[in-house]
Image (tube, helix red, strand yellow):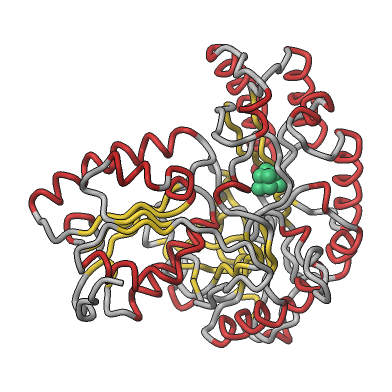
């Protein structure tokens, strides 16, 4: 071990985050760890002593972004030779030492499992070493950090990690290779973190994992996912619980029943389907069928009639025929998701698809299919948003609106953001807002009444 340099009081760190909510949470954890070590957050990379690029490798584009960012930060490093530049997250885990070999100005490459070691790794870097930390800890006693990471500036909503990694090996997905095997965090630990967040004023928690529906299944004596949600919903001060993301295969009746019985479980479910044809689902190594997926949607809507659904769609997966593409479009029409995340397939290293299939759908066909998927969904989303106009909705106020800071913004249980005029004193409270306008991906309205502050008086949410 290199000789350690003194604690970096007064130093500033800039963390740039790409990808999913898991990465957002990881960036929050890294900032928390570094704050305890004397760092402050920098608003701009040019003000920073340490720049960390927290990467995603699920699609190709973020990789390209990282490459171009490294090119840009190189100039900052030439102006300030003490500047430390690190790449963290899934792309770091995927590329490993290759990044250090290719980019001379890079000081640190760190995978997600090494986050707890970040302060020590930066000390080593300051002592003159280039650090590579990409070993994976796939143990049932994996040390989850308990860092209270809030979502956004206001302490209204927070993420809580309940699981890491995934064992499903869907053929397009790099996650099992970058985040490792599935490990569940202990329920007591999770609930302890929820209690501490509630004590800090948090009203809403979002449980994060790659496949939360299988939470606890591989850990003996752990409670199932729906019981974990129910325990969190029962914590004093918590008004809403959410979760993401899941695989339909592991969705069980306990969770469906919870939608019927627990009003604090938000009326929102992100249920990735990926494609509408069974033949595609088989090639993707998804274990659900179209028919079973539609049954699940029906069961969920029977349990919670106002449930908002979203999904992930991949177009142009190897071998995708026009008929299979039409099956995806017809699935969108059948389910009528509130919104979707849709992508063109891109081959990812290590995955089953890259080993087994050619990336044989031409780029222009992928583009056209993506446009058709997105155009259809745009119409459905517009109709879903328009259906809220004139309704009174319960909004958990998060803070000033990003569109106009003189307005407030908050989410309804169905996850739509609602913008309205009101006092900042309402932050963290549930208010009733009458929706007056449907915007592109959000709603606008007017406050009708402040709904409640005391947990005992909370209305049914979602
Ligand atoms: S379940 Fe999700 S994270 Fe796991 S391999 Fe499949 S797509 Fe990837």
The answer to whether one can see residue 408 in this image is: yes
Between 252 and 30, the residue placed more toward the observer is 30
Counting from the top left corner in percent of width and height, residue 259 is at: 83, 62
Counting from the top left corner in percent of width and height, residue 110 is at: 41, 57
Q: Up-down: is 362 above or below 245?
A: above
Between 104 and 286, the residue placed more toward the observer is 104
Which quadrant of the frame does ligand 1 lie within? top right
Q: Is residue 210 left or right of residue 263?
A: left
Q: Residue at x 60, y 80 (%)?
A: 193
Number of numbered callouts drawn: 0
Q: Quadrant of residue 351?
A: top right
Between 243 and 182, the residue placed more toward the observer is 182
Q: Is residue 258 left or right of residue 435?
A: right
The answer to whether one can see residue 387 in this image is: no
Between 239 and 443, the residue placed more toward the observer is 239
Q: Residue at x 56, y 78 (%)?
A: 202
Which quarter of the image is occupied by the C terminus? bottom right
Which quarter of the image is occupied by the N terminus? bottom left
Q: Residue at x 91, y 35 (%)?
A: 291
Counting from the top left corner in percent of width and height, residue 251 is at: 83, 54
Q: Residue furthest front?
A: 1
Q: Up-down: is 329 above or below 301?
A: above
Counting from the top left corner in percent of width and height, residue 185 is at: 67, 72
């Amino acid at each position: 071990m290199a000789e350690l340099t003194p604690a970096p009081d007064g130093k500033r760190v800039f963390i740039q985050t790409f990808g999913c909510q898991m990465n957002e949470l990881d960036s929050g954890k890294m900032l928390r760890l570094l704050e305890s070590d004397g760092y402050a957050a920098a608003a701009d990379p040019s003000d920073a002593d340490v720049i960390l690029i927290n990467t995603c490798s699920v699609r190709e584009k973020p990789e390209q972004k990282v490459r171009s960012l490294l090119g840009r930060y190189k100039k900052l490093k030439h102006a300030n030779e003490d500047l430390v530049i690190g790449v963290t997250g899934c792309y770091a885990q995927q590329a490993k030492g290759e990044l250090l070999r290719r980019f001379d100005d890079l000081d640190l490459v760190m995978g997600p499992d090494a986050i707890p070691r970040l302060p020590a790794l930066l000390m080593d870097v300051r002592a003159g070493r280039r650090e590579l930390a990409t070993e994976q800890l796939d143990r049932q006693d994996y040390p989850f950090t308990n860092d209270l990471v809030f979502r956004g500036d206001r302490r209204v909503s927070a993420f809580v990690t309940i699981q890491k990694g995934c064992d499903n090996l869907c053929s397009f997905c790099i996650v099992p290779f970058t985040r490792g095997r599935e490990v569940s965090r202990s329920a007591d630990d999770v609930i302890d973190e929820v209690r501490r967040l509630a004590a800090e004023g948090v009203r809403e928690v979002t449980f994060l994992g790659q496949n939360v529906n299988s939470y606890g299944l591989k850990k003996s004596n752990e409670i199932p996912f729906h019981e974990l949600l129910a325990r969190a919903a029962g914590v004093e001060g918590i008004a809403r619980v959410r979760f993401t993301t899941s695989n339909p295969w592991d969705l069980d009746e306990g969770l469906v029943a919870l939608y019927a019985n627990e009003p604090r479980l938000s009326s929102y479910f992100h249920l990735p389907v990926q494609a509408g044809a069974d033949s595609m689902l088989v090639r993707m190594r998804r274990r659900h069928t179209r028919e079973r997926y539609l049954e699940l949607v029906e069961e969920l809507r029977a349990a919670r009639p106002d449930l908002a659904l979203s999904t992930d769609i991949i177009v142009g997966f190897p071998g995708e025929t026009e008929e299979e593409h039409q099956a995806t479009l017809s699935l969108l029409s059948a389910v009528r998701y509130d919104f979707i995340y849709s992508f063109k397939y891109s081959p990812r290293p290590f995955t089953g698809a890259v080993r087994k299939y050619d990336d044989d759908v031409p780029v222009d066909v992928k583009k056209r299919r993506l446009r058709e998927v997105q155009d259809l969904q745009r119409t459905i989303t517009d109709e879903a948003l328009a259906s809220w106009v004139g309704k009174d909705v319960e909004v958990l106020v998060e803070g000033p609106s990003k569109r106009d800071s003189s307005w407030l913004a908050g989410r309804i249980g169905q996850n739509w953001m609602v913008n309205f005029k009101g006092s900042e004193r309402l932050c963290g409270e549930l208010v009733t807002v009458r929706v007056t306008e449907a915007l592109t991906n959000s709603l606008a309205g007017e406050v009708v009444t402040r709904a409640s502050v005391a947990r005992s008086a909370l209305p049914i949410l979602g």
